[in-house]
Amino acid sequence: MADELDLLRGANPVPSDGPHYGDGPLDHNAERHLDRLLHERPAIARRGPRLLWGLAATGVVAALVSALLFTGQTTAPAIAAPRPLVVRADSTPVSLKTLAERAKADARDGEPELRKGTHVQSWSMGMSEDKPPITLPEERIVRWNADDSHTEIVVATDPRHPGRPVLVEGDGEPRVVDDGHVLSRQTYPPSWSDAPPKSPPPHDAVELSAYLEEAVRAHLSDHSKPLSTSELLDATKILLDHWTLGARESAVLAGLLADAEGLRPVGQVRDRLGRGGQAYVYEMSGARHMLIMDPADGAVLGLETTFTKAEPEYGVKAGDVMSYSAWMR
Amino acid sequence: MSNDEIFAAAYREHYWAVSRYVARRLDGRTSEVEEVVAEVFTVAWRRRDDIPDAPLPWLYGVARNCLANAVRGYGRRRRLVDRLGNDDTAHGRHIEAGPDAESPGAWVHEALARLSPPDQEVLRLTAWEELGIDEVAVVLGCGRRAASMRLHRARRRLRAEIDRMSPTTPAKEHGHG
C-alpha cells in the first residue's frame, strides 16, 4: 500500500537515476568553479542578477540615493514605475507575416552577424515582500571576447533621462555616458556551454524552435507540446538577453513569431529608447505582452508586460507595467 | 587532510546531489540551478572550517539558505504570474486537475504545494533526498525530536490533502513508488 511518502517518492521531479544531475564526474563548469574556489579564493560569490534581482534593486536604490547624497544634489528624482508604451492611434498595423517577410529579405546578405552578448535596458516591478514595488531601470552590456571570457557592465539608467541609453560602445570598449551609476563591472574568465541559451542560436526555423524550447522549458516539462505563444515570448527574452541576433537569426525568429497564435498587430509605438516600432500584443488572463519589432528589418526591439486587471494585494493597478526590456545592437 | 582538501572532496562527491536538491526546489528553472549551486559551494568554501564529517546534510542546509535568498524576490512575482493564469509557462511543471491526470506526479506536487513551506521541506528531505531523521535535523538546524515531530505532522497533513483531492478513490490505487 502506497503511503503518502511513497507517493511523494514516486513524484520526485529529479530522481538520482534520472537524465539530469546524475552522479558522476564534474562537468566543465563545475570543475572550473572548484578550481576558482581553490586557487582564486574569491571574497564574494558571483550572484546571478536574475536570481537576486529583488536584492539588487534594493542596492540600486541605495547606491543611487548615496550617489545623490554625496554629489550634493538636493532634489532626488522621483522613482516611479514606467508608463506603458502608447500605440499611435493614427498608425496602420503591419502584420507579423509582412514583417517576417521583410526580415527574410533583409537577411539575404547575412549582415549584420550574430554576436554573443547583449545590450539591454530593462525594468521589472520589484516584488520584495516588504518594499514598494518600484525599482529603477538598468542597462546591461555583456560582451564576449575571443578567449571566451566576458565582461558585464550594469548601470542604473540616468533617472533624469529615463529611457536614454547610458552605455555606449566605442574604441572596442563599452563605456558609460552621462551619469548612469555603475552597479557592477566584472570580467569573467573563459567559459562555454553547448546548451541553450548559451550555445549559438541556429538559423533554421525547426532548430531555432527546439533551441528556444530548451532554453525556456525545464527538464521537468512535457517536451512533446509545441511552444505556446507566451512561452515563445519568454524564450525570445531569454535569447535576446544572451545574444545580439544577426539578420539571419532575426529573420527566423520573426518567422516563428509570425506563426504564433494570438499575437495581434496593433500599430506603431515609440519605444523607451525613442525608436519607432511595430507593436504586437498577446493577451493573457490578467496581463498583456507587447512585442515591439523594427518595421524595417523585423528585429525584435523590445518586450513589455502590463497588467490588465488590478491586483490590490500586490499594489498593482490595471495598466501598470510589470516589466520591460529594450534590446540594442 | 587540510580543510581545503576536505572541501574539494565534498565538492566532488556531492556536487550532483546538491544540484538535484536545488533543481527539485526551483521547479524546473534549469538555467538557475547551476548559479545557485555555485553560490552554495562558494558559501561552503567560506565556511569550510565548519564542514562536518558527513557533509551532505550540512550542504543541503547551506543550499536551503541560498535558495531562500534566490527565491525571495522571485516568489512574490511567481505567485502573481501564477495567479494571472500563466502557470503553464516557464515553470517547468504542469499542475493537473486531479489524480486521473496523465502526469502521475503532478497531483502529488499539488497536494504538497498546499502545505506550509516547512512541512513541504521536511517531506521533500525525507522522500526526495532520502535523509534519515538525524540528517533532516542537521538540514533544518533543529534537534532530532523536533525534526521527527515535524515529519510526523507534515505526513499527516499531506495525507489529508491527498485524501481531499481524491475523496472517492483510495490513494493507494495511484501509488507508483
Image (cartoon, rainbow, N blue to C red):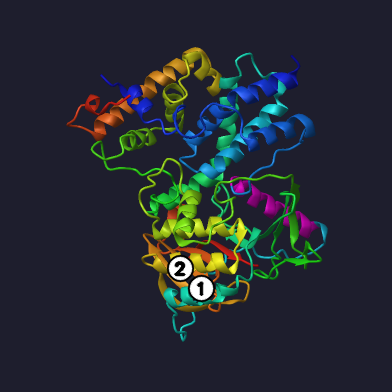
Q: Which mark is residue A255?
A: 2
Residue type marked 1: Lys
Labelled pair 1, 2 in contact (Cβ < 8 Å): yes
The quadrant of the rendering that contains the C terminus of chain A is: bottom right
State the residue in front, B162 or B145. Answer: B162
Q: Residue furthest bottom?
A: A90
Residue A68 in picture, x, y percent from top left: 77, 60
* Residue B53 occupies quadrant: top right
As drawn, B102 above or below A16: below
Span of residues in magenta: A51-69
As drawn, A207 above or below A276: above
Residue A28 in picture, x, y percent from top left: 64, 37
Whether labels 1 and 2 share one chain: yes
Q: Residue furthest front?
A: A109
Predominant SS of the magenta segment? helix
SS for tag 1? helix
Identify the residue position indicated by label 1 in the image.
Answer: A104
Pointer 1: residues within 10 angstroms few (<14), some, or many (20+)?
many
Instruction: Say whether residue A85 is magenta.
Output: no
Q: Would residue B141 be seen by someone viewing this image from the given angle?
A: no
Q: Residue furthest left?
A: B168
Residue type marked 2: Gly
Pointer 2: residues within 10 angstroms few (<14), some, or many (20+)?
many
State the residue in front, A296 or A113. Answer: A113
Q: Would residue A180 be seen by someone viewing this image from the given angle?
A: yes
SS for tag 2? helix
* Residue A297 occupies quadrant: bottom right
As drawn, B66 above or below A325: above
- Give the CA distance from mark 1 to mark 2: 8 Å
